Image: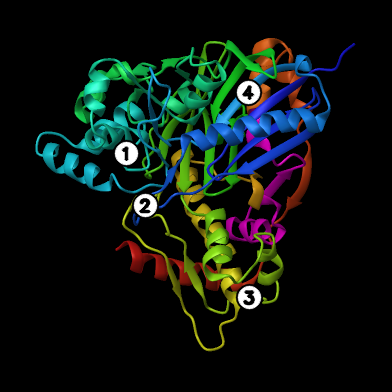
Amino acid sequence: MIEKYILAIDAGTTSSRSILFDIKGNQIAISQYEFDQIFPKKGWVEHDPEEIWRTQLKSIKEVIALAKINPKNIDSIGITNQRETTVIWNKKTGKPIYNAIVWQDKRTASICETIIKEHNSSFCVNTFFQEKTGLILDSYFSGTKIKWILDNIPNARKLASNNELAFGTIDTWLIWKLTNEKLHLTDPSNASRTLLYNIHQLKWDNELLKLLDIPISILPNLCQSSEIIGEAEILGEKIKIAGIAGDQQAALFGQLCFNPGDVKNTYGTGCFCIMNTGEKPVKSKNKMLTTIGYQIDGKTIYAIEGSVFVAGALIQWLRDKLGIIKTASEIEELAKTEDDSGGVTFIPSLSGLAAPYWDPHATGNIMGITRDTTKGHIARAALEAIALRCKEIIIAMEKDSKTKFNNLKVDGGASNNNLLMQIQSNLLESNVIRPKTTETTALGVAFLAGLATGFYKDLNAIKNIWEKDKLFKPEKKSSIETVNKLWNKRISQIVN
């Protein structure tokens, strides 16, 4: 019998990756290519959509070559992606009319402020958006990015009125390209991050579209997260596309968080903690986001999410801008050269502060530096900063769910940093569990694709695939109390 595989396309914020998994969830091969991060102005972050497509296609072809398999042996494709990042292209030419505006981009903060000022006399704008979308009006999400492109790119609104433009998050853009410009689709997990999708009615919302002045004609059609939607032609073979999910929701699925109360935290460019809340949306009272986890077999699973904009990106900054490390992996050993952070506190708001503050104008700070401060202190303070921001979110989620998490499942590249995971466990006073496969974003969308095609019979068929790699148990350390006190004092100076 010919062995079959699933191809997971993981379109991230800094790179395009392709991973092949076998039926047991083993990673057979991986290919990854970084693409340019474009910073035209302060607070602006862009990507070239064509470069995303070129690097993604290159990685797809390479991973098949590395695995030495025939494309015929690929059962299906799952696509997971950086969310909120916005691409608008001309349907006739197939070309983007502007660079992709990345989720980290803050240029539309002024648009959000203007909308709030214009409408708050008649109704609370944030309540209006939260009731419909589970989100707040913030530059993080796609809606105001779409509006900016339509308002600022010559002829954009004219082209839109002639039904010549298409909007998509990165999953939609890649599906368009993979299907030779035949399919314009997204799933609810991505749609729910646009500020335009009603998570209760499960459709694009006309009132939201009117408020942001966005024509519905540019929006993609909707499909389930696990569903055969069409075929991609790769190396002369037609392969089913059967799974779509935003990266954090895919990781939720890949961590087998199928039950209400299950929670995971992904440590990537940013950190994203999501808790499954079941088939009913839970409105957060602590400035978390209500979102759609995934949609499968006609059921919509909701989640509460908290976001940290800068996590792995902080380590990249220390590497690329300060030069205190040459590779990101060196941060752990450097941090270990000191027993504590020496009173240094790193406020990692290099792209504003997300939950629970939602301050797009906040800037980063390193506080408590003295003549005795070393590179090791700064490195350790950076790891503590990531863990402290995650702690703030998890505490807020515990309040919303009215429960204390005993276990936190973790994944993403930075979860391989043992010191960071131990610090996280100490700060939370709970167990931190890392799986053997930390590529759970890609694995999750592979599961979604495989369930749609019958590659996996049901959820029980994938439950035995997940394996624990390491358990981090909390250690009582006197320095943790000091770190917490300094953090609370110094973060208040930034946000108040």
Question: As rendered, which of 257 and 48 lies closer to the eye?
Answer: 48
> Which of the two marks, 3 or 1, is nearer to us in this view?
3
Circle nearer the viewer, 2 or 4: 2
Q: Are marks 3 and 1 in contact (CB under 8 Å)?
A: no
User: Mark 2 or 1 closer to N-term?
Assistant: 2
Structural distance between the alpha carbons of marks 2 and 4: 32 Å
Q: Earlier in the sequence, mark 4 or mark 1?
A: 4
Question: Where does the image place residue 452, in percent across and percent down from the top left?
Answer: 64, 13
Instruction: Please identify the residue farthest to the right as the structure is shown.
Output: 1
Find residue 78 and name its label: 4
Q: Which marked residue is nearer to the observer: mark 4 or mark 1?
A: 4
Q: Is residue 87 visible?
A: yes
Question: Helix or strand or loop: what does disc 2 sit on?
Answer: loop
Disc 2 to disc 4: CB gap under 8 Å: no
Q: Which residue is mark 3?
A: 376
**Nearer the N terminus, badge 4 or badge 3?**
4
- 391 sits left or right of 210 in the view: right
Q: CA distance from mark 4 to mark 1?
A: 29 Å
The three-letter amino acid code for the residue at tag 2 is Pro
What quarter of the picture does the N terminus occupy? top right
Residue 114 position, x and y percent, is 17, 43
Residue highlighted by disc 1:
136
Crowd tier of the residue under label 3, counting other residues whose Cα lies within 10 Å: few below 14, some 14–19, many 20 or above? many
Q: Amino acid at mark 4?
A: Gly
Q: CA distance from mark 2 to mark 1?
A: 26 Å
119, above or below 206, in the image: below
Query: Which residue range is magenta in the image?
Result: 415-444
| Residue picked out by circle 2 | 40
Residue depicted at 53% across the width and 62% down the height: 317
